[in-house]
Image: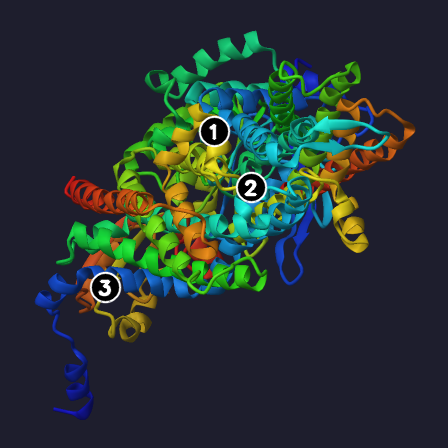
Amino acid sequence: MLVSAAVAIADARIGKYGERTFSGRPHTVMERSYIAFKSSAWIVVLSGFVEPLLYLFSFGYGLGKFIGTMNVGHGHVVTYAAYIAPALLATSAMNGAIYDSTFNVFWKIKFDRIYEGMLATSLGPLDVALGEIGWALLRGFAYAVGFTTVIVPMGLIQNWWGILAIPAAVLIAFGFAAIGMAITTYMNSFQQMNMIQVVMLPMFLFSGSFYPLSVYPHWTQEIIKALPLWHAITLVRSLTLGDISLGLLPHIAYFLVMIFLGLFFTTRRLTALFMR
Amino acid sequence: MNSPAPILIRATGLTKKYEDFVAVNGIDFSVAKGDSFGFLGPNGAGKSTTMRIIAATLNRSSGSIEILGKDPELHGPQIRAHLGVVPQQDNLDQALTVTENLYVYGRYFGLPKKFIRAKIEELLEFAALEEKRDVKVEALSGGMKRRLTIARALISEPEILMLDEPTTGLDPQARHILWDRLFRLKEQGVTLLITTHYMDEAEQLCDRLIVMDKGSIMAEDSPSGLIKTYSTKEVLEVRFGSDKNALVAGELEALCERIEVLPDRILMYGEDGEHLLHTMKESGLQPLTSLVRRSSLEDVFLRLTGRSLIE
Amino acid sequence: MTNKELERQGSLKIVDTAKIMKYGALFVASARLRTLSKWMISVIAASFANPLFYLLSIGVGIGSFVNAHSTNHTIDGVPYLTFLAPALLAMVAIQDGLSEVTLPTLQGFLWEKNFFAMNATPITGKQIALGTFLAAVTRTFFSVLVYFIVIVAFGAVDSGRSWIAIITAMFASSAFAALMMGITAWAKNSDLLLTFVGRFIVMPLFLFSGTFYPLSSMPIFLQWLGWISPLWHSIELGRYFTYGHHLSGTALALHFGYLLAMLVFGLLFSFNEFEKRLSK
C-alpha cells in the first residue's frame, strides 16, 4: 500500500520506547517558537538582557562603594561587584527561562489553544513539553551568555573555571523552565499566574544574591537553602570564584531532579488536558 | 465489478462515560475508504466526542475502535499521521502568518521542508488564500480562517479528513465556498468525516449518515434513504394561529399519512402536498398560511426523536 | 394608578445633565474606585509587599554590611535603613500611581473601550482623564499610608515631621502619573508600551535615582538620570522631612518646582490626548 510521508515517518517509530508520548520531534515545536519570535517584539527580549546589567551597575558599583569587599571564605576577598555578578547571572538564566515557560505557555493553553493543534498531529505530549521547555531554556541561556560576555571584560570572572558558569546556566534555565511549565499547566486564572511573580522577587532578594545567608537567623537560612535560586547562585558563584569541590554536586543534582519532575508533570498534565 | 472499498474505521459498542453522564452510548459504525460520512444530530448528541475518540485525542470508556486496523489508544501518533483534523473552534496559531501556519503544521508531522514548501503553494491555491499568504491569521475573516484550517489539515496528505461542524458561524456565501472545496476533496478520493447539526449540509456533503441523539445512533443510511424510510415525499406546513393548531389537529390527522404538531405550525406528511392542501380546503379548513415542500432530514430527525434539530 | 406603578414612576431618575457636566470627573473616579474596592486588600498587599521585601533584603540585609563598612562615615550620617526608607516610600507611590493610571487607560481605550461608552454620555474626555487620575491618586494614597506605617514600625524614621514625606511622595506620584497617563493615551501599541515603561523607565528610575546611595556618588555622566527623575526629587524631599537630610532653600524650591511643573504639564497633556483619542 502506498502511504503518505507523514504516515511513513510516524510508522518508523513503532516499537520505540515511549512511542505513545514521544515522536522524536521536539525541535519542530522549537522551530515554531523561533518563527513566532522573529516577528515578535525584540525590545521585550532585549529588556531581559539589560535588567541584570542595571542591577550590576547600580548595586555592584554604586552601592559597592559603601560596602567595600566581601569575604567569600578560604581567605578569599572579592569586590562587591564580583560578589553579586554570578548571582545576577544565575538570576537572569532563571528569569529568561521563566518568561517563556509561564505566561507565554499559559496564553497558549487558555486562549490560542496551540497545544490542542499540535497534539492533533503525530506529535506526542513529550515532544511538546521538551520543545517548549527547550525554547524557554534557550532564552535563559542567551541571557546568561550575554551577561557573561559583558562581565568578563570587566574583570568580574577571573579564573578559567568561570567558563563552566555557562553550562551551569543552561542547567539552571532548564530546571526553571521545566518546573515553570509544569506549574503553569495546572493554573486556571491570571490571578494564579500572578502568584508566580509574587514568589520570584522575594526569592531573588533573599537567596543570597547580595550578601551571604549568615546575616539571617538559622531557620531562615534553612528555608532559603531549600529554594532553587539559592542552589543556582551558590553553584555559579563557586564556579566564577574558582571554588571547585565535590560540594557542588548536590546543587547539580537539585536541578536534575527539577528537570525530571518538570518534564514528568508537564507531559502528564498535557496528556490529561488534551488527550483524555 | 470492483471489490468493495476497504473499511478504514470500525467501531463496535463504542462508549464514553463521564462521571455523571454518558456522552456516547455503545455505538457501532464503519466508514469505508472514499466515503463521505456524516454524524448528524443536535448539540450534545455525542458527535464531537466520537470524533475526538477517532482522532486519538480522547480515550474511550469501553467498546472497541480500529482506525486503519490500529487501536488509537495504543498507536496515537501513527493514527494521527493518517488524519487531518478541523476542530469545531479554530485553533490556528495567532502569532503566525498564513504560510507560517501551514509550514509549522507540516513540520509537526516531521515532513521535510522542501516537501512542505511545494505543498503550501498547492494548498494556498486550493483555499483561495494566495493573496493572504503573508498576513497574520488574526486579520483573516471567519470563512478564510476555516479554509486555512482545512488547508492546514491537508498538509500531511491525510487519508481521512475530519471536520467538526465545518460551517457553523459562517455566512451563507462563505458556507458555499467551503462546500465547494470539500466537494473537490471528495472527488479526489479523500475520506470525509463530518459532524453537523445542519441538515442541508448533511444532504449536500454526505453519502452516508448516522443520526445521533443523546449518545445513541437513531438511524443510518444515505440522506435519500433516510428520507425514504422515515418520511414521505412531501410535506405540507400549515398554520392556523397558535391557539387553534391543536384544535384542528384531530381533523387533519385523518387526511394524511402522519402529522406533527409543533408549537407554531402543523406538518402534514404525504406523497402529494398540493393535493393534500386541496382536500383540506375542501373539507372546510382554511389555514392562515400554507407551504408545500419536499421532505428533508429535519423531518427524519423529528420522526426519530420527536424533537427539532435546532432548538 | 396602582401603588406599584406609582413606586416605579417615583424611582425613575431623570438624568441631570447639568450635574454631570459639573461633576463628571468625580463620577468617573468613583466608578473606578468602586470596582477597585472589591480588590482593595489584595491590591494594597501586592503593591507594598515588593517594597517591603526590598526594605528587608536591602535595608536590613545589605544595611548590615554598609553600616559595618562605614562605621565612621555612615551614608548621610544615618543608619542605612533610615536612609533607604523614604526612598522606598517614594517608589511605592510612583509605581502604584503609574499602574493605576496605565491599566485603566489601556482598558478604557483598548481592551474594553469603556471610555468611549462614558464619552457617549455628557461626560467629556477631560473629565474622564481627571477622574481616572483622581481615582489613581486616591488608591495610591492608601498604599503609601500603609507603607509609611510599616517604615515607622521598622524604626526607620527619625523626626516628628516625617509624615510630610507622605505628601512629597504623593506629589511625585501624581506628577509622574499625570504624565504617563497622557503617554498611554497617546501610544498605539499598548502591550509593548507597558513592557517598555516597566523595564526601560521604571527599573532604571528605581536603580539610578539615588535610591540606594546618594546620587552624588554616581559618576557625573549618570547623574542626569536622577535630575530628570521625579523619584529623585521626591526622595530628596522625603529624606529632608524624615531625618533632616540637608537641603538649601533653593534646592527645596527646585525640587517642588520641578514636580509641580511636571504635574501641570502632565495633566494638560493628558486632557489633550484623551480628547483627541475620543474624538477619533
Residue, disc 1: A44
Colouring style: rainbow
Q: Nearer the viewer, mark 1 or mark 2?
A: 1
Q: Chain for mark 3?
A: C
Between A229 and C62, the residue placed more toward the observer is C62
Residue, disc 3: C27
Between B301 and A216, the residue placed more toward the observer is A216
Q: Residues within 10 Å of mark 3 (few under 14, many from 20)?
A: some
- Give, as a three-letter code, the residue at label 3: Phe
- Give, as a three-letter code, the residue at label 1: Val
Circle 3 — which element? helix
Q: Position of residue C13 (x, y in %)?
A: 15, 75
Q: Is residue C179 above or below residue C1?
A: above
Label 3 vs label 2: CA separation?
36 Å
| Residue A67 located left or right of residue C27 | right
Q: Are marks 3 and 2 in contact (CB under 8 Å)?
A: no
Q: Residues within 10 Å of mark 1 (few under 14, many from 20)?
A: some
For the question of whether residue B245 can be seen, the reply is yes
Circle 1 — which element? helix
Q: Nearer the viewer, mark 3 or mark 2?
A: 3
- Give, as a three-letter code, the residue at label 2: Phe
Residue, disc 2: A106
| Residue B72 located left or right of residue B150 | right
The reply to whether label 3 and label 2 mark residues of one chain is no
Q: Residues within 10 Å of mark 2 (few under 14, many from 20)?
A: many
Label 1 vs label 3: CA separation?
37 Å
Q: Position of residue C102 (x, y in %)?
A: 35, 45
Q: Chain for mark 2?
A: A
